[in-house]
């Protein structure tokens, strides 16, 4: 059976730190005990859905990062980009689509050697 505790711990801790929250602040936001956050981040405990769901939603975590941790390791820059985009408003996202589309066209026309910098 797949052991999800380490990927869960890694993803939650990284997302919490990305949002600049302490364990106590996060616990208060989702109305759970601070020890629950501590236990999750230390690979102890098996959170119920009533804890896991608000935790993932509050931190804006992609559940795939927990259940498919190999993708996270392979695409760390894409995941960083994903976290940034997930915090955008609809208006910001619409503007970014046009910008990113233009940038990608330029980058792809330059060839792969210029993209590795």
Image (cartoon, rainbow, N blue to C red):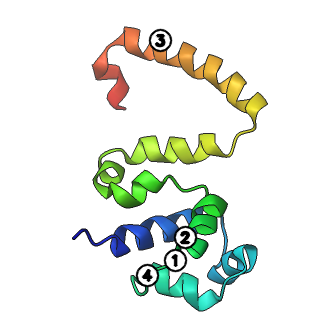
Dot 1 falls on a residue whose secondary structure is: loop
Name the residue carrying label 3: 106
Dot 4 falls on a residue whose secondary structure is: loop
Q: CA distance from mark 4 to mark 3?
A: 47 Å
Which residue is more in the foreground, 91 or 109? 91
Q: Which mark is residue 46?
A: 4
Name the residue carrying label 1: 48
Sequence order check: which comes first, mark 2 or mark 4? 4
CA neighbours of label 2 inside 10 A, class few (<14), some (14 to 19), many (20+): some
Sequence order check: which comes first, mark 4 or mark 3? 4
Name the residue carrying label 2: 52
Q: CA distance from mark 3 to mark 1?
A: 47 Å
Q: Residue at x 53, y 86 (%)?
A: 38
Which is in the foreground here, disc 4 or disc 3? 4
Q: Quadrant of residue 75?
A: top left
Q: CA distance from mark 3 to mark 2?
A: 41 Å
Q: Kindly indicate whether the residue at mark 2 contacts the one at mark 1 (C-beta within 8 angstroms).
A: yes
Q: Position of residue 41 (x, y in %)?
A: 47, 79
Q: CA distance from mark 4 to mark 1?
A: 7 Å
Q: Kindly indicate whether the residue at mark 2 contacts the one at mark 3 (C-beta within 8 angstroms).
A: no
Sequence order check: which comes first, mark 3 or mark 1? 1
Q: Residue at x 66, y 67 (%)?
A: 20
- Which quadrant, please, contains the C terminus? top left
Q: Kindly indicate whether the residue at mark 1 contacts the one at mark 4 (C-beta within 8 angstroms).
A: yes
CA neighbours of label 4 inside 10 A, class few (<14), some (14 to 19), many (20+): some
Q: Quadrant of residue 46?
A: bottom left
Q: Quadrant of residue 90?
A: top right
Instruction: From the viewer's perspective, tell me whether residue 5 is left or right of residue 51.
Output: left
Eyeballing the image, is 59 above or below 117? below
Dot 3 falls on a residue whose secondary structure is: helix
Dot 2 falls on a residue whose secondary structure is: helix
């Amino acid at each position: 059976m797949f052991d999800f505790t380490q990927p869960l711990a890694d993803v939650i801790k990284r997302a919490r730190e990305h949002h600049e929250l302490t364990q106590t602040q996060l616990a208060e936001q989702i109305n759970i005990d601070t020890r629950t956050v501590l236990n999750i981040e230390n690979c102890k405990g098996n959170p119920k859905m009533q804890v896991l769901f608000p935790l993932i939603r509050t931190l804006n975590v992609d559940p795939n990062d927990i259940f498919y941790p190999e993708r996270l390791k392979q695409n760390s820059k894409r995941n960083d980009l994903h976290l940034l985009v997930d915090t955008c408003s609809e208006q910001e996202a619409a503007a970014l689509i046009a910008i990113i589309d233009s940038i990608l066209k330029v980058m792809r026309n330059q060839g792969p050697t210029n993209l590795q910098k």
